[in-house]
Amino acid sequence: MKTLLLATLSMISLGSSAQEIQGTLMLKGSLKTKITVNNVKSVCRLKIEKVRNLMQEDSMGNPGYQARIKLNLDGNDVEKNIKVKVDKDIIVTNMHFEGNLRKVKDFDYLNTTEKVTVKIDEEGRILSTTFPYQSQTITCKF
């Protein structure tokens, strides 16, 4: 009888620990860092303008969030006559689609049409952003 009770309790505990979401919100603010793109020293800026609840849940019942960001990459080499310029207003969300299921990921925000990703830490601070520029992928680490 004890064995049956232990087996039942372990099955229940395994079934209830499917996915744990902390509900970490991205913090508002702006960051900048220096990077080199096409041998041109550039400045990458990311500004989080607004974060809001999507009022939608994923298949596990976790709420999704979206953030409106302003992404700016600016660089200029006068001698070689090369300019690096990106200026976008983008909406990113932590609600990801995997097949037919929606899944919330606490630390990964993305925009699939612009192919922009933003990663945050456990406290909501921005760690990095990745986006396409010409035929390459740019990563700005803050």
Image: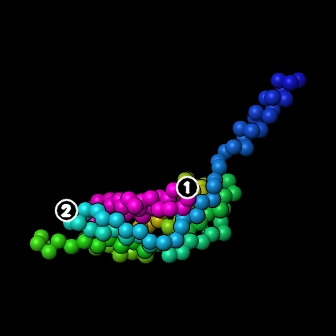
- Work out whether residue 122 can be spotted: yes
Q: Is residue 78 left or right of residue 63?
A: left
Residue 6, picture quadrant: top right
- Coloring scheme used: rainbow
For the residues labelled 1 and 2, the Cα–Cα distance comes to 34 Å
Question: What residue is shown at x 44% (from left), y 67% (from top)?
Answer: 113
Of the 4 image quadrants, the one containing the C terminus is bottom left
Residue 97, picture quadrant: bottom right
137 in magenta: yes
Checking the image for residue 131, the label placed there is none
Residue matched to label 1 = 122
Checking the image for residue 39, the label placed there is 2
* Residue type pointed to by label 2: Asn
Tell me whether the residue at label 1 lies in contact with that at label 2, contact meaning CB atoms closer than 8 angstroms.
Answer: no
Residue 105, picture quadrant: bottom right
* Residue type pointed to by label 1: Glu
**Residues rendered magenta in the picture:** 116-142
Number of labels in the image equals: 2
Question: What residue is shown at x 14% (from left), y 74% (from top)?
Answer: 78
Q: Position of residue 15 (x, y in %)?
A: 72, 41
Per the image, label 2 sits on a secondary structure element best described as loop
Closer to the eye: label 1 or 2: 1
Q: Residues within 10 Å of mark 2 (few under 14, many from 20)?
A: few
Q: Is residue 102 left or right of residue 42?
A: right
Per the image, label 1 sits on a secondary structure element best described as loop
Question: Relative to 74, is 17 above or below?
Answer: above
